[in-house]
Image (cartoon, rainbow, N blue to C red):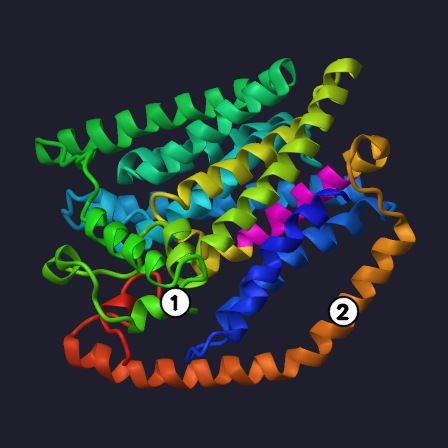
């Protein structure tokens, strides 16, 4: 529970975003509700009688749904071959734009497939373990086929962190992830390379890029924005409405936001948001060190916390090179993962209550949660009205999209092409 106080400055920064004289007042509260809701609810879960069963069932459901998604991706692949389309990378995840949305789901979920295979509610059945292994292999195949660099970088960093933190406790999880990775590599070799070569006489592989894909002008523009009103930023969604600062951004082909969540927050909410995030990260790391020490002393291999830690670290790392964390699908999945992650941190805090700087009783935490619920209820109606106004603004934007011949997309992908003055 002590990690909640480390999170408090981060939430307060977003709440203070409501004080900016900006047109949009929806997003600051959304981030505040998202992070505070996940961690507050997570602290209450361990107190329920069937918490462990619910976790195992959630992991099983996630793995089965991901398997269905994977089967549909294989179906799309087969239809592409039937239609004579060699560029299978553009169809397996429902088209090229969706690669970006899907890749962050992969970053969140792939570490969980290994937990489901080991600790899911049906993991004792050999057939179920085989299906979960296949699910992970298919998702790794999609990563290789679409060259999802952000996912790969995030998963590598997440794996490295759990190795450092949990040492021997992470070996079982790493072994399962490695087998799924090898399975994905085998599927890539067969489905992406061998089969198209046999059908078309050549394999049209997606290029593995090592450059920034046009991100540097965006990062430079966001950096300069963050210095204009240092350290408080220019306000929510000011990226869409601000006057261009750098010549490189003005001369480039602008697309969406800076593709770096932390630079985007620095530009709009100020560097105080990044500093507050670092405080929260420090508090979480402190709880993880306490938990990992306890596992080492007990010679216990807690696969669930290992996988959840890898998932969270990978997702926040991926957000630094693509920022798809703030896409709706990613935040929906992230809400579940962060809640489970917070629940396991709370369990470690209960066992090692005397190891933190802050000591909170159950009654104090429930009182704080109750007060927060009252506050959220009072401002919820106002917030929903702002959501409706935001929806109406976006309906007006649709005319601009249609006029430019572009698809109608949320802020992450195309919305930044059409800033509203």
Quadrant of the drawing holding the N terminus:
top right
Taking depth in this image into account, of 94 and 407 the one nearest to the observer is 407
Q: Quadrant of residue 245?
A: bottom left
Element type where label 2 sits in the image:
helix
Q: Is residue 289 magenta?
A: no
- Secondary structure at numbered mark 1: loop
Q: Nearer the viewer, residue 411 or 288?
A: 288
Q: Which residues are magenta?
A: 333-346
Residue carrying label 1: 234
Question: Which residue does the image show at 50% across and 54% down from the upper left?
Answer: 272
At x 8%, y 31%, the residue is 201
Q: Check disc 2 and report the residue beneath it.
A: 373
- Crowding around mark 2 (Cα neighbors within 10 Å: few <14, some 14 to 19, many 20+) is few
Q: Percent position (x, y) of residue 292? A: 69, 23
Q: Is residue 345 magenta?
A: yes
Q: Looking at the picture, tell me which residue is in the foreground, 411 or 304.
A: 411
Image coords of residue 4 (percent x, y): 71, 48
Q: Is residue 222 above or below residue 420?
A: above
Image check: 380 left or right of 164? Answer: right
* Relative to 23, 126 lies left or right: right
Q: Residue at the spot x=70%, y=20% of the render?
A: 301
Q: Main secondary structure of the magenta part?
A: helix
**Mark nearer the N terminus (2 vs 1):** 1
The percent position of residue 18, horizontal first and vertical second, equals 53, 73
Residue 142 is at least partly visible in this image: no
């Amino acid at each position: 529970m002590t990690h909640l106080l480390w999170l408090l400055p981060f939430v307060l920064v977003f709440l203070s975003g409501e004080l900016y004289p900006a047109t949009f007042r929806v997003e600051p509260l959304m981030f505040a509700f998202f992070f505070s809701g996940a961690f507050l609810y997570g602290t209450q879960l361990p107190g329920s009688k069937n918490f462990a069963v619910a976790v195992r069932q959630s992991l099983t459901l996630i793995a089965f749904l991901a398997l269905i998604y994977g089967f549909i991706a294989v179906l799309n692949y087969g239809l592409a071959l039937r239609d004579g389309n060699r560029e299978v990378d553009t169809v397996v995840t429902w088209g090229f734009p969706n690669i970006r949305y899907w890749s962050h789901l992969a970053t969140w979920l792939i570490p969980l497939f290994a937990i489901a295979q080991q600790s899911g509610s049906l993991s004792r059945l050999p057939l179920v373990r085989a299906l979960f292994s296949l699910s992970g292999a298919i998702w790794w195949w999609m990563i290789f086929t679409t060259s999802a660099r952000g996912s790969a970088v995030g998963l590598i960093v997440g794996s490295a962190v759990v190795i450092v933190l949990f040492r021997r406790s992470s070996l079982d999880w790493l072994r399962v992830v490695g087998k799924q990775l090898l399975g994905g590599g085998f599927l890539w070799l067969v489905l992406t390379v061998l089969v198209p070569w046999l059908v078309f006489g050549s394999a049209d592989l997606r290029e593995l890029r090592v450059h920034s894909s046009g991100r540097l002008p965006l990062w430079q523009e966001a950096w300069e924005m963050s210095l204009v009103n240092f350290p408080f930023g220019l306000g929510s969604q000011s990226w869409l409405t601000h006057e261009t600062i750098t010549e490189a951004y003005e001369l480039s082909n602008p697309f969406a936001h800076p593709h770096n969540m932390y630079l985007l927050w620095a530009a709009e909410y100020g560097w105080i948001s990044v500093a507050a995030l670092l405080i929260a990260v420090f508090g979480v790391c402190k709880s993880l060190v306490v938990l990992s020490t306890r596992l080492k002393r007990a010679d216990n291999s807690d696969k669930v916390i290992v996988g959840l830690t890898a998932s969270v670290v990978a997702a926040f790392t991926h957000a630094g090179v693509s920022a798809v964390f703030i896409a709706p699908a990613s935040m929906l999945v992230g809400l579940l993962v962060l809640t489970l992650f917070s629940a396991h941190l709370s369990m470690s805090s209960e066992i090692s209550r005397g190891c933190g700087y802050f000591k909170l009783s159950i009654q104090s935490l429930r009182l704080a949660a109750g007060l927060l619920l009252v506050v959220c209820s009072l401002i919820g109606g106002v917030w929903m009205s702002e959501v409706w106004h935001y929806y109406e603004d976006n309906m007006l934007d649709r005319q601009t999209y249609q006029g430019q011949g572009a698809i109608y997309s949320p802020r992450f992908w195309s919305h930044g092409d059409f800033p509203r003055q």
